[in-house]
Amino acid sequence: MCAMLGPVVPYGLAFVEPFAEAALASATLRGFTPRVDQERLDELVAAVVRPGDDWVLNV
């Protein structure tokens, strides 16, 4: 399941968030069995990582 709050201006998120939470809390999936596919997960994460996001910062 996926939910996206947008396109909404950042301040607008404060107004729609309670409605989205209620909708997601009441949602159910029948017959869904999650599977562990580390390769696919790594592929999805790599697709949204911007250059520099994965740099290690020594603080």
Image (cartoon, grey):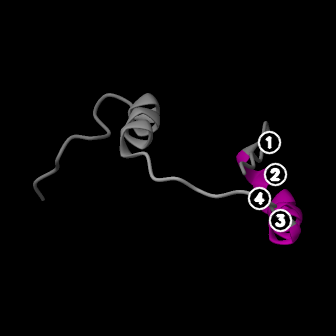
Q: How far apart are marks 2 and 1 (CA)?
A: 6 Å
Q: Is residue 10 shown above or below 33?
A: above
Q: Is residue 50 shown above or below 53?
A: above
Residue nearest the viewer, comparing 50 with 47:
47
Which residue bears the numbered disc 3? Answer: 28
* Quarter residue 28 falls in: bottom right
Which residue bears the numbered disc 2? Answer: 12
Q: Earlier in the sequence, mark 3 or mark 1?
A: 1
Mark 2 and mark 1 residues within 8 Å of each other at the beta carbon? yes
Q: Distance between the residues labelled 2 and 3?
A: 26 Å
Amino acid tagged 3: Thr
Q: Which residue lies furthest to the left in this view?
A: 58
Prevalent SS, magenta region? helix
Q: Position of residue 51 (x, y in %)?
A: 31, 28
Mark 2 and mark 3 residues within 8 Å of each other at the beta carbon? no
Q: What element carries label 1?
A: loop
Please check the rendered image and state whether residue 22 is part of the magenta-colored stretch, yes or no: yes
Please check the rendered image and state whether residue 11 is part of the magenta-colored stretch, yes or no: yes
Q: Distance between the residues labelled 4 and 3?
A: 10 Å
Which residue bears the numbered disc 4? Answer: 31
- Residue 11 in the figure: left or right of residue 37: right
The magenta segment is 10-26
Amino acid tagged 2: Gly
Which residue bears the numbered disc 1? Answer: 8
Q: Which mark is residue 29?
A: none
Mark 3 and mark 1 residues within 8 Å of each other at the beta carbon? no
Q: Where is residue 2 in the image (x, y as percent from the top left)?
A: 71, 48
Amino acid tagged 1: Val
